[in-house]
Image: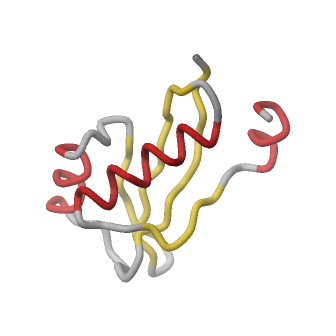
């Protein structure tokens, strides 16, 4: 398995909270760092998976289960070139 790094912008939230971080962790997102910057809350994942699609899909499911659906996924261009 390969580790994939990506950032998920959390819909309708401008600030990360401890409650948000705890809910994401409890939903299985123990590989996420939850933070906010420039008026957006997001989770940065380093996820081990067989491919990038699986890594992102599982993270999105966990965010929804935690009550924090995503509005956008961002992948570092260099990571995409190296991994894909």
**Residue 59 to residue 20: above or below:** above
How far from the left and from the top, in percent, is residue 8?
Answer: 50, 59
How far from the left and from the top, in percent, is residue 15?
Answer: 32, 74
Q: Is residue 6 left or right of residue 26?
A: right
Residue at 45% x, 81% y is 39
Asked which quadrant contains residue 73, the reply is: bottom right
- Judging depth in this view, the residue of 38 and 28 nearest the camera is 28
How far from the left and from the top, in percent, is residue 13?
Answer: 34, 79
Quarter of the figure that contains the N terminus:
top right
Asked which quadrant contains residue 72, the reply is: bottom right
- Judging depth in this view, the residue of 25 and 59 nearest the camera is 59
Q: Is residue 59 left or right of residue 3?
A: left
How far from the left and from the top, in percent, is residue 75?
Answer: 67, 52
Q: Residue furthest top?
A: 1
Residue at 43% x, 54% y is 60
Residue at 24% x, 54% y is 21
């Amino acid at each position: 398995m390969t580790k994939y790094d990506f950032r998920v912008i959390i819909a309708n939230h401008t600030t990360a909270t401890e409650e948000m971080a705890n809910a994401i962790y409890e939903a299985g997102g123990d590989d996420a760092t939850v933070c906010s910057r420039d008026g957006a809350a997001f989770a940065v994942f380093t996820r081990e998976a067989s491919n990038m699609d699986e890594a992102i899909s599982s993270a999105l499911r966990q965010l929804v289960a935690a009550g924090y659906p995503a509005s956008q996924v961002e992948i570092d261009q260099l990571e995409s070139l190296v991994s894909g």
